Amino acid sequence: MKRKLLCSFISFAVFMFALPLSTTAHNSDYWSGVYTGFITQSNLKFRIESTAITSLLTSSVYHSAYNWSGISSNVGNIGVAIAAPGMPTTGFFSVYGQVLYGGTLGTTIYMDSLGNIVNANSNWHMVCILMNTDFSAYSGTGDPTQVAKKVFMHEVGHTLKLCHPVYSPGASGHTYNGGYPKTIMNQGLPKSSTPWVSATIAEHDKSNLKAKWGA
Ligand SMILES: [Zn+2]
Ligand SMILES: [Zn+2]
């Protein structure tokens, strides 16, 4: 009996020691499927349409998407182009602005080659992102620009097939609010009362991106 207890203690101690070294990715944190068009996760380029440019949603907000580059060797440099007259419309996924209701800050729509909205777990041909142009949606924290960057990076995370992390008590890294990891892929405003909503790409996001597309 004593021997068994000692064994359990040793395996527990080894487990606790090994935990920080192990990967914290979970396949419930990302969608299945790939891109089937000629734009893929390795050459994602976004065209910021004029409707998506406001005094808050500036080019520097959209350039925050570059933070997803270089984490996975199979996710290349993210491209961001501010639409200008004469610029080609092909080769890009569009980002549009409109007033969104119900507390939605941004949303990503995934489609087949005909533009039909498809299931998140299926193969995608293209995506588009809608950003809320209502300035007041980004208030409630100290820095609306930081919130806007969080929103755009979150939506670009969706285009990379990362989903909202599943509530999973006991899963490695899911230590916040009973079962959520600290990640930019959580919904909501990044504020001190919700420390699991990260304003920047967190370690758990990086692990999931590498698990999805390769290290
Ligand atoms: Zn997870
Ligand atoms: Zn989302």
Image (cartoon, rainbow, N blue to C red):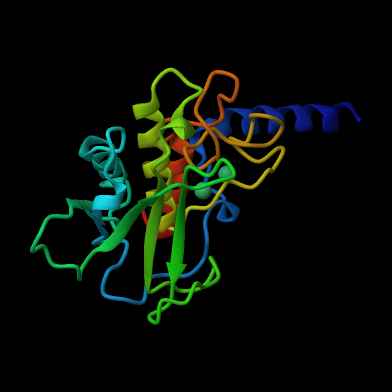
Quadrant of ligand 1 in image: top right
Which image quadrant for residue 188? top right
Q: Is residue 101 above or below residue 87?
A: above
Identify the residue at image location x=78%, y=32%: 8
Identify the residue at image location x=43%, y=30%: 199
The percent position of residue 183, horizontal first and vertical second, equals: 50, 36
In the displayed structure, does residue 94 sit left or right of residue 3? left
Which image quadrant for residue 86? bottom left
The percent position of residue 39, horizontal first and vertical second, equals: 27, 69
In the displayed structure, does residue 102 sit left or right of residue 58? right
Q: Residue furthest right?
A: 1
Out of 177 and 170, give the one closest to the viewer. Answer: 177
Identify the residue at image location x=23%, y=62%: 43
Please indicate, yes or no, whether residue 27 appears anywhere in the rendered image: yes
Q: Is residue 116 above or below residue 208?
A: below
The percent position of residue 56, horizontal first and vertical second, equals: 31, 33
The percent position of residue 2, horizontal first and vertical second, equals: 88, 26
Out of 14 and 149, give the one closest to the viewer. Answer: 149
Report the quarter where the N terminus lies.
top right
In the displayed structure, does residue 103 sit left or right of residue 125? right
Identify the residue at image location x=47%, y=38%: 184
Q: Residue furthest left?
A: 86
